[in-house]
Image (spheres, rainbow, N blue to C red):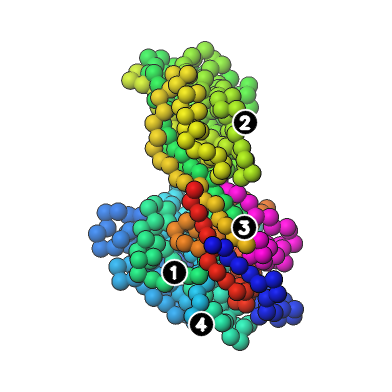
């Protein structure tokens, strides 16, 4: 089943000068958007599993309540699940429902001491709004609220209802949308603004695993952590500090002294972006340790097999299809006398036969002496949607940014997977830095305005397009 758009749709509800007035209206509301974002950023809305009074913690619940309060102030009809799993804000009339899938739960602040300012205090510097969740979830939420409110002001009749669905558990198990799907109306068509890339037509398979190998009597390392992130720090506290620091300087790798040890510095990024962004501190440390005389299979794997090639062609050869190339993030390394363990996150092309790939990687690693233990597997998402719809959404981007917006395949897992008939239509626009979940997370004011404008135009177009559900297949 495909989302179908008539080749000769009715005229748009917002055209010409009216369209210009709509876009200008959103620009004029930037101060209101910043104030609204400040209200949400101030709330520590990450999972707190010990709070028995709420599903996911008092902070998450406070943020949901504040969002619905703001929506009501803007003229939306609002509803909250009796147990607090989700809420929604709706505007417009008609039997058909268009959804906008957002969430308020954010990741806890990483390395709070390294922030320029408090993560829970929205701070503006040079057109950038710094604050926890500002780009990951709360900025996009404010942008779509602003977009729908502006569209309602500039349109006499919205012939379809538009519902902003607000989840509370996007970052963990998605239990909020399981509850929503069981109790509420599923939109005929939805867009999710919190993903990566303006317009996504598919998402790669994700495989996370640990490689188990021999121990070391000479070297003890405990580096990295979350498998979904490129590690930006890797520490060494052995006896060859001076040699290591000299070698790091020769390579031009930044480091610092900390607690009588040496910390190699990198640049954090999401695992899905490891081929294009981020600098892996573990691979740099391992290369330097190899160079000063340490010898261990883990060092060789990290510095030579992975090294500066996230495509790991030395291990698997060239693996790609029309959705892009395979990438591997080396996320953690732990080794001592008892053994060694390497944590990896692999993003696998959408159409690659999975069973044969697993056989290949297991055999390749076994030849190097590593035991492969799967930790997590997520199926790819292949979105089947009419070209006219993709063109319509792309045109909304082009009208605002002036840049061509080609549908892409992403290495991320977006929140769009949480509901049927949902397309990732991201708020992170090309040319703006991805800081979601990182130290000094921020969103550009221009990005915030453009996202609201793009959504206003896209929703205007969708008001008059004959729709059938989109098929999002997890292969």
Please report contact status of discs 3 and 1: CB closer than 8 Å, yes or no. Answer: no
Please report contact status of discs 2 and 1: CB closer than 8 Å, yes or no. Answer: no
Label 2 belongs to which residue?
A: 318
Alpha-carbon span between mark 2 and mark 3: 26 Å
* 115 lies above or below 295: below
Residue drawn at x 41%, y 28% is 372
Label 3 belongs to which residue?
A: 199
Label 1 belongs to which residue?
A: 186
Magenta residue span:
387-412
* Lower position in the chain sequence, tag 2 or tag 3: 3
Q: Nearer the viewer, mark 3 or mark 1?
A: 1
Alpha-carbon span between mark 4 and mark 1: 15 Å
* 375 lies above or below 401: above
Element on which disc 4 rests: loop
* 365 lies above or below 182: above
Q: For the residue carrying disc 4, how many other residues have a C-alpha within 10 Å: few (<14), some (14-19), or many (20+)?
A: few
């Amino acid at each position: 089943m495909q989302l179908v758009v008539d080749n000769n749709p009715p005229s748009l509800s917002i055209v010409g000068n009216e369209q210009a007035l709509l876009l200008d209206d959103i620009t004029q509301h930037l101060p209101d958007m910043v104030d609204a974002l400040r209200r949400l950023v101030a709330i520590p809305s990450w999972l707190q599993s010990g709070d028995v009074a709420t599903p996911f913690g008092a902070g998450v619940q406070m943020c949901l309540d504040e969002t619905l309060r703001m929506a009501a102030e803007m003229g939306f009809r609002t509803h909250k699940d009796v147990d607090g799993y989700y809420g929604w804000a709706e505007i417009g009339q008609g039997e058909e429902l268009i959804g906008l899938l957002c969430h308020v739960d954010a990741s806890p602040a990483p390395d709070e001491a390294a922030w320029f300012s408090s993560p829970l205090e929205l701070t503006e510097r040079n057109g950038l709004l710094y604050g926890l969740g500002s780009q990951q979830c709360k900025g996009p939420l404010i942008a779509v609220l602003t977009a729908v409110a502006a569209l309602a002001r500039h349109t006499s009749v919205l012939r379809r209802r538009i519902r902003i669905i607000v989840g509370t558990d996007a970052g963990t198990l998605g239990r909020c949308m399981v509850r929503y799907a069981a109790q509420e109306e599923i939109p005929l068509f939805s867009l999710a603004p919190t993903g990566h890339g303006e317009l996504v037509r598919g998402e790669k398979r994700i495989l996370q695993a640990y490689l188990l190998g021999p121990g070391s009597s000479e070297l003890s390392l405990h580096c990295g952590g979350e498998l979904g992130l490129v590690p930006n720090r890797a520490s060494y506290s052995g006896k060859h500090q001076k040699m290591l620091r000299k070698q790091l300087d020769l390579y031009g790798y930044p480091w610092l002294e900390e607690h009588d040890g040496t910390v190699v510095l990198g640049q954090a990024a999401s695992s899905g972006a490891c081929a294009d962004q981020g600098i892996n501190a573990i691979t740099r440390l391992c290369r330097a340790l190899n160079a000063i005389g340490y010898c261990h299979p883990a060092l060789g794997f990290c510095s030579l097999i992975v090294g500066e090639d996230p495509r790991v062609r030395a291990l698997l050869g060239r693996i790609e299809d029309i959705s892009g190339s395979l990438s591997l993030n080396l996320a953690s390394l732990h080794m001592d006398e008892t053994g060694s363990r390497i944590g990896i996150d692999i993003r696998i092309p959408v159409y690659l036969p999975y069973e044969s790939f697993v056989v290949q990687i297991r055999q390749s690693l076994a030849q190097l002496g590593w035991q492969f233990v799967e930790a997590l597997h997520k199926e790819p998402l292949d979105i089947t949607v009419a070209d006219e719809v993709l063109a319509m959404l792309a045109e909304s981007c082009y009208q605002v940014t002036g840049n061509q917006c080609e549908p892409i395949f992403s290495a991320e897992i977006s929140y769009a997977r949480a509901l049927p008939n949902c397309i990732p239509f991201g708020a992170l626009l090309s040319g703006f830095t991805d800081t979601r979940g990182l130290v000094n997370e921020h969103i550009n004011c221009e990005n915030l305005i453009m996202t609201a404008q793009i959504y206003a135009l896209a929703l205007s177009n969708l008001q008059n397009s004959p729709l059938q559900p989109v098929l999002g297949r997890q292969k």
